[in-house]
Image (spheres, helix red, strand yellow):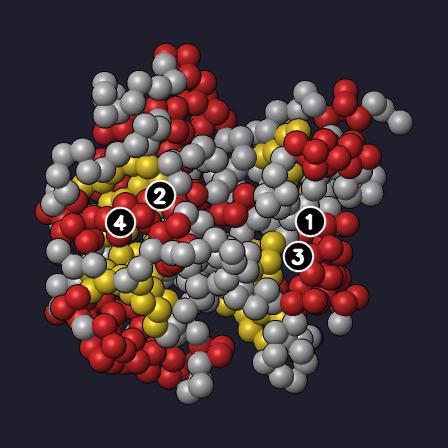
Amino acid sequence: MTDVADAVVPLAGGPTLPQERRVVTAIPGPRARALHERRTAAVASGIGSALPIEVVAAGGGVIVDSDGNSLIDLGSGIAVVNVGNAAPAVAQAVAAQAASFTHTCFMITPYSGYVQVCEQLNRLTPGTHAKKSALFNSGAEAVENAVKIARHATGRTAIVVMEHAYHGRTNLTMALTAKSMPYKAGFGPFAGDIYRVPMAYPYRWPGGPDASGLEAAAEVISDIHTTIGADRVAAILVEPIQGEGGFIVPGKGYLPALSEFCTENGIMFVADEIQTGFGRTGQWFACEDEHIVPDLITTAKGIAGGLPLAAVTGRAEVMDSVHVGGLGGTYGGNPVACAAALATIDMLEHGGLIADAQRLGAALRTRLDAMKARDRGIGDVRGRGLMQAIELVEPGTDRPDPDRVRAVLAACHAQGVVTLSAGTYGNVIRFLPPLVISEKLLHEGLDVVAEALAVTR
């Protein structure tokens, strides 16, 4: 057999990388297992891995490991590499910027890349009002700063978040996040003045899917008035489609009702678009589906082609309410990450990728609906664009079936398809392929998923 190292390591991650599923060893293979042994000795055990391979190249819709396996990527690094893992335009922009300078700290000596990214975000995010932006490193950091800005701008302290929400792993964002294990267990005490309210979860709403949106919004508004006090609330923070909580698409009318309530009561409506943004749902941002114009919007993940960058964008007067020095960070808006973001945004805007997300999303939905029609253990299919999911339940009930999810994922991984779970109950399989994946490769990956569902039924 050809030496795997010679065959794999030189491959580039762009279009030259063969777009094929190829399984030549058990997954993980011997080289991946050797790395995992080193990882076990060197890396904190609290950092998990869904599939312990050793990646040596990635691009388009595939990930290649050191054992010569080529896996179909239905995860995109959790919705990060929307434009692919090694998009040539992004790689070239990164290389050029790194050759000029990698860091100065924008708060000390500014550079144009930071300003350009802010200009693009101000232009692209929903709403025609004057906007300003600030750049950070991670989604959790963006959410924390959105809370800071909302509190400072309103002079209030209470923050309202949703059931099933996920907003990060820092102390404040753990308080904002709903699920205890693995995100919060043992890490308290958490930040205070955080209040959790009902989410319009159509599949599990007592009144049924059609009633979930407006009924849930009415409950939220009632809860705020009776248990918090609307005049104490600085912000309502919501994911337009919940991510880690299970790709929950709120019932129609839920987001508009909450947005209107915020406007009437001087509350900041904050859209967490960290997982949903940058074309993922077939629109630039998921809140556009119901014409929501947030006061503040947080972005990260898909913003920079895989480099760490995040942002808060909002109404200019709200963003400017914070005193000089109240926002920032040493690495926030790193020049190399900004170069990657500008190239990524250009690809999304001029490369047809958002239209591709709509087209491929329609194909994905057709396949998932067909799986559901054959399988009484699929309780729900939901999502938009290339952010969709199936919720697995015990047949004939709505009881979550996380054991089957684990079995399906293991079967997919063994056959060379990267799949991810989600959900408060661990019973959701989510699909987040890169926007640049070919339709052929997407269907092949879904064939493997369908077979895994069949053998675990």
Tell me the SS state at disc 2.
helix
Image quadrant where one finds the N terminus: top right
The amino acid on which the numbered mark 3 sits, given as a three-letter code, is: Leu
Q: Which residue is mark 4?
A: 146
Q: Which residue sits at x=20%, y=48%?
A: 149
Q: Which residue is mark 2?
A: 141
Tell me the SS state at disc 4.
helix
The quarter holding residue 335 reads top left
Up/down of 116 relative to 401, above or below:
above
Q: Position of residue 311 (x, y in %)?
A: 31, 41
Q: Which residue sits at x=63%, y=43%?
A: 45
Q: Which residue is mark 3?
A: 446
Q: Which residue sits at x=75%, y=72%?
A: 457
Of 378 and 147, which appears nearest the observer? 147
Other residues around mark 2 within 10 Å, as few (<14) / some (14–19) / many (≥20): many
The label on residue 417 is 1
Q: How many marks?
A: 4
Question: Rounded to the nearest whole Å, what is the CA distance between mark 2 and mark 1?
Answer: 31 Å
Question: Which residue is at the far front?
Answer: 189
The amino acid on which the numbered mark 4 sits, given as a three-letter code, is: Ala
Question: Which residue is at the far bottom?
Answer: 207
The amino acid on which the numbered mark 2 sits, given as a three-letter code, is: Glu
